[in-house]
Image (cartoon, rainbow, N blue to C red):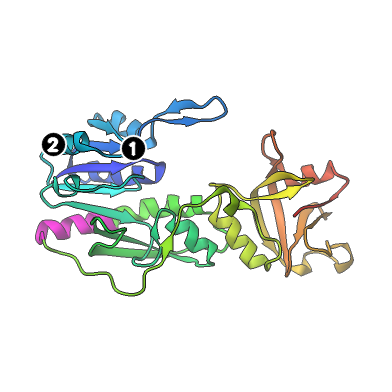
Amino acid sequence: MRIVFAGTPEYAVPSLRALVRGGHRVVGVLTREPAPTGRKQILVESPVARVADELGLPVRTANRPDAGTAEWVSGLGADLGVIVAYGGLLREPLLTEPTLGWINLHFSELPRWRGAAPVQRALMAGEQRLGLTVFRLVEALDAGDVLSRDSREFAPGTSAGAALTELAEYGTAALERAILELARDPRAGEPQQGEASYAGKLLRADGRLDLSRPAGEVLAQWAGVTPEPGAFVHYEKQPLKLLSVAAREESSASPGSLPKTVGEVRLVSGRSLLRVSAGLLELLRVQPPGKPGMSAADWLRGRGGTAVVS
């Protein structure tokens, strides 16, 4: 099948590679424009653009597809459009340029968690079984008919980055099933059933951990915002990034040595333990402002083995 592919981040790369590996002819790749990265704000092309170049595929960059983009897609003569985490809305006439329209691999069990950050919001809500859905793209947000779906179970504390990496690989099978179904029946698809929920884009403020919540909920919040926008607490009125954390039982040390008040971090048997409203978390790696990531135990030793964060 002749396919035009739209995607941008690393999580879209497995689908692009799978389409080429599966014998489909990818006639063009649409991705977002190079973005400023790092302290020097150097323009860097997207992961999908890099892989498309590696595979020798035609590439067009656009943050907001316009009439020129639609004309480019029309000239490709594609049977089907496939979109995975592109990061921009496709509208008419672009939506109907490929003969069979567009399908989208979305990382939730639709209609749950429509929107920009489905895995992140699901993890923040404490969900451990994460889904994926391949559906027909329509102008309404993530509302088209379903062609295939699947799901996987993740351990508590699995970061959004790790979960998305796994789902991106796992989802290629569902994508191929959807394409085969469309080849068999161009009208295939079932309407979404159930109540919709929405996964709005994360803001930096979402990363500030609420230590007044129980340990399981704080760990879920950490998981949902890691690696982006990044989890943090405040130490001496400055943000301290929490790069890696883990749940810990109260029995992990003698009661007298454990931190007692919410926000207290104490070095106990070489472990940096943080007290939240109900339970403990272990800080594994942290990043102070303007410094590289480091062992949380080393950071805490530099403060006499105890600190208070908020």
Residue 14 vs residue 272: left or right? Answer: left
Which amino acid type is shown beneath numbered disc 1? Asn
Disc with the residue nearer the chain's start (1 vs 2) = 1
When the figure is inspected, residue 180 is found, relative to residue 83, above or below; the finding is below
243 over 220 or under it: above or below: above
Q: Residues within 10 Å of mark 2 (few under 14, many from 20)?
A: some
Measured as percent of width and height from the top left, residue 127 is found at: 50, 67
Circle 1 Cα neighbour tier, 10 Å, few/some/many (<14 / 14–19 / ≥20)? some
Give, as a single range, the part of the protein colored magenta.
Answer: 174-186
Along the horizontal axis of the image, is 308 left or right of 34? right
Question: Magenta region, mostly helix, strand or loop?
Answer: helix
Instruction: Please identify the quarter of the rendering in which residue 188 is found.
Output: bottom left
Q: Nearer the viewer, mark 1 or mark 2?
A: 1
Q: Looking at the picture, which amino acid does disc 2 mark?
A: Leu
Instruction: Establish if 37 lies above or below 170.
Output: above
- Residue at (23%, 69%) from the top-left corner? 191
Which residue is at the far bottom? Answer: 194
The residue where tag 2 is placed is: 76
Residue pictured at 29% horizontal, 73% vertical: 193
Q: Which mark is residue 63?
A: 1
Q: Secondary structure at mark 2?
A: helix
Q: Quadrant of residue 194?
A: bottom left
